[in-house]
Amino acid sequence: MTAKSLFEKVWQDHVVVPETDDTPAVLYIDLHLIHEVTTPQAFNVLRERGIRVRRPDLTLATMDHSTPTVPVTSLKDLDVVAEGSAARQIRQMIENCREFGIELHGFDRDTRGIVHVIGPELGATQPGKTIVCGDSHSSTHGAFGALAFGIGSTEVGHVLATQCLLQRRPRTLAVNINGQLAAGVTAKDIILALIAKIGVDGGTGHVIEYRGSTVAALDMEQRMTICNMSIEAGARAGMMAPDETTVEYLRGRPMAPQGADWDAAVKRWLALPSDPGASFDREVSLDASALEPMITFGTNPGMAIPVTAAIPERYSGPSFRKAMEYMQVEAGKPMLGKPVDLVFIGSCTNSRITDLRQVASVLRGRKVADNVKMLIVPGSQAIKQQAESEGLDEVFRAAGADWRESGCSMCLGMNGDTVPAGQLCVSTSNRNFEGRQGIGARTVLASPLTAAAAAVSGSIADPRTLETRQ
Amino acid sequence: MEKLTRLESRITLLPANDVDTDQIVPARFLTTTTRAGLGKALFADWRYDAAGQPKPDFVLNQPEAADSKVLVAGNNFGCGSSREHAPWALADFGFRAVISTAIADIFRNNSIKNGLVPVVVDQATHEWLMANPWETVTIDLERCELVLPDGSATSFPLDGFSRYCLMEGIDQLGYLQQQSPAIDRYEEQRPWKP
């Protein structure tokens, strides 16, 4: 029998109709995550054609993108705090879920949160599943050994109607990450360093499998941070082998299998890792022990450097010059010491409890600098409660940071949380595209530790120079 | 979806690499619940000034762009977010094809479902296009070829199914629904249930 990769195992397990030269494969989807922004047009198509949702039980719905991060306890509140079209979109989501019989983790539920945060948190995300969402950061769920990828709204309609997608089999890319991380260096630094190395189109057409001793040593939350940003390298998806860390994370979660089903599932999950000798279309390697905290300087996530380094001069061409002008930075000079206006902690990349603990370890006993506004947005209501039970909210407030309800918030500025034009924001999110956080906003991507260090320093800082306090 | 076999149009040049879908349609326009009317949001932050007035030097604001159906952009066009609002906006503006040296995966998938042809060409062809603003080219789906004004043709990759759907204006949902006996069978017979 030929050796198979993790991807091949999950792919083959979900082929309903094999692909041919003329037709793509029909691929079964085990979990469909939906949110308010990319689904209304899909539900409209179903309504126009009189089609029902095939598997509402395999559909997990929440509200995150255009959702306010100030408290909303009733729909009357919503009209006060949300902009008109955002409020209408949220109401439409509630109506669509009601009409099509889908359980919605909405304002009245303490299970609400960013779609890629609550899937794992509820235990709906499991090894070996196929998972899709009308959101490119669906790659997050690959950290569990699921095949998870982003789709457009037309395809959201396809999954709602048939629980299947038409797919051509992607190529595979093995990313080998070995070595022990230095203090102050985290998963965010690994993925930024990788994208800087292979480029924002380095993974196009491929599913990445992250492998090696560094990956095996990471907890699930750090693994999710890496898989989350696979799309920023252009990859279709990112996956990691399920292991005991994965199993322990899922044990006892509300939507995880129970009893005898659990035992059978664990046995199946632990057989998923790539077989020895499995082949990949491409391979790249990264030495994790050589990594430093990373920050971005330009307008895509591949424009990243170690926090102590100078902006490289090896780039050329109009796109690079445009990015330098937009960011108001100069090649040959460091980002370190550059004054900061805003710090955003949040997004499906870095808003989980371990991220918040890291931020607290920097903020404890310190103050957010006078020139900086800091916004901390937990990934889910459950994380918010957990953080508050640990007293982290008090650490944040005492430092002068703003502590909010869950949502996508300032990652993409759809809900009113935006960065004013021209201001520099150090953000734990995933995209530093022009205008992503607001018209004219200048975004610097970094880890929670580096972002917190910038908040207390008032300028871009090396987190390794600040003593952390637990 | 409108059928498309052959498209002859002048080209509009956007010589930037890694154009992401946040540029194609900024997120603040994503609170819509329909697909209509997004053409006015296309490249909004590059196209309009702070007062909402068109910037005369941006290519889409030049008169030649008004009836252009083919956009030529730099490498890795459409990267980033999965928002289908990006091809909706391009199509609503009037584009029927995008030419680049590489096109991001999700954007490519979304484009094909909206009658927007993704055309990936080699570096030399791309350089020629970038050096010849507003020239007229032909995209021939029958042959999967881009034909330049001198009659020279370059083939571009497009799988048979996507090509068929674009040429016949076919909606893939109907095709998927026809697979329902196989989907029923798969659900019944699979060894584990999600």
Image (spheres, coloured by chain):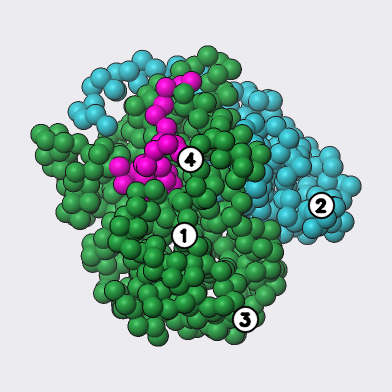
Chain colours: A green, B cyan
Query: Of residues A104 and B113, which is closer to you in this image?
Result: A104
Q: Are marks 2 and 4 on the same chain?
A: no
Q: From the image, tell me which residue sits under label 3.
A: A331
- Is A372 left or right of A272, judged from the image as shown? right
Q: From the image, tell me which residue sits under label 4.
A: A73
Between label 2 and label 4, give the one nearer the viewer. 4
Which callout, 4 or 1, points at the residue further toward the start of the chain?
A: 4
Tag 4: residue type?
Answer: Thr
Q: Residue at x 64, y 58 (%)?
A: A438
Question: What label does residue B52 carry, if any?
Answer: 2
Residue B45 x/y as whole percent: 73, 55
The chain containing the residue under callout 3 comes to A
Between label 3 and label 2, give the one nearer the viewer. 2
In the displayed structure, A406 sits above or below B3; it is: below
Q: Residues within 10 Å of mark 2 (few under 14, many from 20)?
A: few
Residue B41 seen: yes
Residue A9 x/y as whole percent: 26, 41
From which residue to which does the magenta span run? A99-122
Question: What label does residue A403 carry, if any?
Answer: 1
Between label 1 and label 3, give the one nearer the viewer. 1
